[in-house]
Amino acid sequence: MISWRRVLYSVGVLVGLVLFLYQVWLAYTNLRHQPLTEFAWPWLMGGLGCYLVGYWVQMLAWATGLRYLGAALPLSVVQEGYFLSFLPRYIPGTVWGYWSRGEWLAGRGVSHGTSALASLLEVTTLLLTAFILVLLHWVGDWWPGVVLISPLALGVNWWLVPRLASRLSPTKWALPAQTEPFFRSAVLGSALYLAFWLIHGSALWAVAQGLGAGTSVDLWTSVASASLAWAIGFLVLFVPTGLGVREASLAALLTRYTGVAATVASSAAVVSRLAIIGAELVWLLVGLGLYLRSRIQNQIRSAPYAKSNGSLP
């Protein structure tokens, strides 16, 4: 009997794929309308490379959260399904991507409650680390205070989110009997998400350099701007993946805090979005390749069993 949840999962992935390809087309058409005077390919390819590495770091951080919640997955499995199952996030409403990821994890033996809790922990840590980096950029000489408070805030986040969820719904979000050590998970997970933002900002800086921004755009401002623009886009729930909102926010932040020309800032925002989509496409292809390899290996393993039971001639 076919599960309706699996059918909806498959439909959601297909719809998400169509919408993702539509985002690729929109980014390309927006790029064609940008007044690009410079286009240094080595810098731009460096930006794409940073986004690729950044997403790999994000997958490691998410896997760390899953292990902390008692649901360890091999890295190859994480790479197979992290982006492929998350394609429905391009459907307006934000929740569809997380629901789809939960269905994929259910097929791997992870309960819906655990997958939802892992997604919640990922979102809170992403937002918290993003705001920490923004504060470090804004507070000036007060930065030691932010440095002192940040580890405490991140530790409370990793300790409180699972326990608060288990209090709200003990049957759905019950804490597992055995988890990875709290301290190690909190430090490693938070460090990985901070690294993700630093790499993300470095990619934006490389893109800006490739478009001729020069010394007008510094690395630290790029990190803070990229982090804040992502947070703004994420919090606008009705816009899938913050499309348009993040670009507008990023262009405004670069113009305000770097003094770079508005045309360059706008072009950097659009090109960075295209590079992000390119990195996502690469990881989608990696995930699809791993998925097909897994299916083929499963069929090979099941063939001798089928023969022994007379199912095959």
Image (spheres, rainbow, N blue to C red):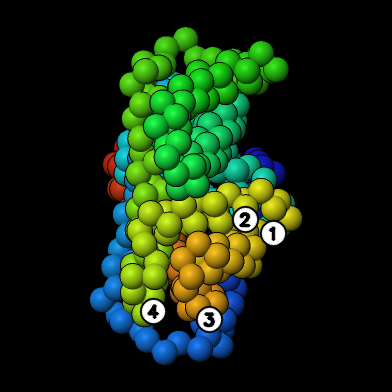
Label 2 to label 1: alpha-carbon separation? 8 Å
Q: Residue furthest left?
A: 42
Looking at the image, residue 309 sits to the left or right of residue 248; the answer is left
- Disc 3 crowd rating (10 Å Cα; few below 14, some 14-19, many 20+) is some
- Across and down, in percent, residue 174 comes to 59, 15
Q: Amino acid at mark 1?
A: Val
Query: Which mark's residue is nearer the viewer, 2 or 4?
Result: 4
Q: Secondary structure at mark 1?
A: loop
Query: Which mark's residue is nearer the viewer, 1 or 4?
Result: 4
Q: Which residue is mark 3?
A: 263
Label 1 to label 4: alpha-carbon separation? 27 Å
Nearer-N-terminus badge (2/4): 4
Question: In the rendered image of this protein, does residue 73 appear above or below residue 312?
Answer: above
Looking at the image, residue 164 sits to the left or right of residue 179; the answer is right
The part of the image, by quadrant, that contains residue 214 is bottom left
Q: Report the disc number at residue 233.
A: 2
Question: Mark 2 and 3 residues: CB-CB less than 8 Å, in contact?
Answer: no
Q: Amino acid at mark 2?
A: Gly
Residue 249 seen from this side: yes
Question: In the rendered image of this protein, does residue 3 appear above or below residue 281?
Answer: above
Q: Secondary structure at mark 3?
A: helix
Nearer-N-terminus badge (3/1): 1
Q: Which residue is mark 1?
A: 239
Q: Which residue is mark 4?
A: 211
